[in-house]
Image: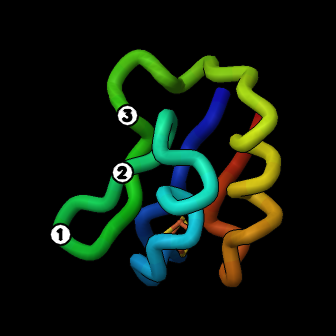
Amino acid sequence: MVSVDEEKCIGCGSCGAVCPEVFELKEGKSYVKAGQEKSTLPCVKEAEESCPVQAIKLD
Ligand code: SF4
């Protein structure tokens, strides 16, 4: 499962830039798009690594 910790996210936009299929920014926070929670796209891992505050969780 892909998830974003809203408390940690600073809305930098990096995840959405790296992986727009899965992440979208709304009102300064990133969210996993509906239906993408189980995405196995390689860019999800790239987005996780690109997040400056480790707000993206893969489990
Ligand atoms: S990369 Fe991290 S801090 Fe930046 S918008 Fe995405 S989840 Fe938030």
The residue wearing badge 1 is: 27
Percent position of residue 42, x then y: 80, 34
Q: Does 13 sit left or right of 57 as displayed?
A: left
- What's the mark number on residue 33? 3
Distance CA(mark 2)–CA(mark 3): 6 Å
- Choose mark 2 or mark 1, whichever is in front: 2
Mark 2 Cα-neighbour bin, 10 Å: few <14, some 14–19, many ≥20: some
- What is the three-letter code of the residue carrying label 2? Glu
Percent x, y for residue 49? 82, 64
The kind of secondary structure element at disc 2 is strand
Q: Going from the N terminus, do you reach mark 2 or mark 3 first?
A: 2
Provide the residue designation for mark 2: 24
Element marked by disc 1: loop
Closer to the camera, 14 or 3?
14
Asked if labels 3 and 2 touch by Cβ distance under 8 angstroms, the answer is yes
Q: CA distance from mark 2 to mark 1?
A: 10 Å
Q: Position of residue 59 (x, y in %)?
A: 78, 33
Q: Residue at left 74%, top 22%?
A: 40
If you read the primary sequence from the N terminus, does the residue marked by circle 3 or circle 1 appear first? Answer: 1
SS for dot 3: loop
